[in-house]
Image: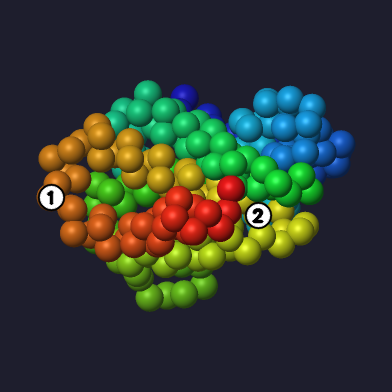
Amino acid sequence: MNILILFIIITAIISFVAFNNHGITEKYKFSVGAILGRKEYIRLLSSGFLHADIMHLVFNMLTLYFFGPIVIQTFGNLGFTIVYLGSILLGNFLSLYIYQKQPWYSAVGASGGVSGILFASIAMIPDIDIYIFFIPIPVKGYIFGLLYFGYSVYMMMNPRQHDNIGHAAHLGGAFFGLVYAVAVAPDAAIHNALYLGIMSLPLIYLGYEIFVRKRIG
């Protein structure tokens, strides 16, 4: 079975089971208080296989389905697995660092892993056309990346209780996918350096906020 389809099936099954058993979501979702207070580190990975609702699941799995083949074709099944799981983990580690003083913060979703796959694809094909749901006009990949990073940076710096959307996880996952693609395919990265630089501008601002102004973390 195709590794992409396998991940989609596993995620869908676990998410549907959790839809009907809220206790599963509570036990395995990303939760700052549970991870730091009770050392429940499994949540760093398990939260990536849970979703808030059916639309959340469908959106993530459709995005994974459309962009996963680019990563598989470029980096193989192993590369796809590394990017997907690595992006979930790095995204959640970033969330843990950013929200370490907010024990109430929690989130679910494969968005970190999906973001990693999406941005590994954009790193290879920065001018790829991306269609945002319900908007019939395509957006170039690097423009989408700029907007995506900007929105994620803003939301992670202004968290809302009960939001349940892992904005820091999105950002960390996207960063992992981007860095993996650049490291494994440096020639393509050099060729696409201008595009990658443009969409990384919000990350530079985030670094300034974290390391210079000490605003978060």
Residue 17 rendering spot, x and y as whole percentages? 78, 36
Q: Residue 178, image x and y in percent? A: 34, 44
- Indicate the quadrant where residue 40 lies: top right
Above or below for 29 versus 147: above
Amino acid identity at mark 1: His
Tag 1–tag 2 contact (CB < 8 Å): no
Closer to the camera in the image, 118 or 166: 166
Residue at the image point whose x is 49% and y is 53% from the top: 210
Element marked by disc 2: loop
Which of the 4 image quarters holds residue 177?
top left
Residue drawn at (56%, 37%), measured in percent from left and top? Answer: 93
In the image, taking residue 95 as reference, residue 163 lies left or right, namely right
Residue 52 in percent (x, y) is at 72, 50
Please tell me which residue lies in front, 99 or 73. Answer: 99
Checking the image for residue 165, the label placed there is: 2
Distance Cα–Cα, label 1 vs label 2 = 34 Å
Q: Secondary structure at mark 1?
A: helix
Residue at the spot of label 1: 191
Whole-percent x, y for residue 86 in the image: 47, 32
Q: How packed is label 1: few (under 14 Cα within 10 Å), some, or many (20 or more)?
A: few
Q: Is residue 20 left or right of residue 94?
A: right
Q: Please state if 184 lies on the left or on the right of 47 as rendered.
A: left
**Mark with earlier residue (1, 2):** 2
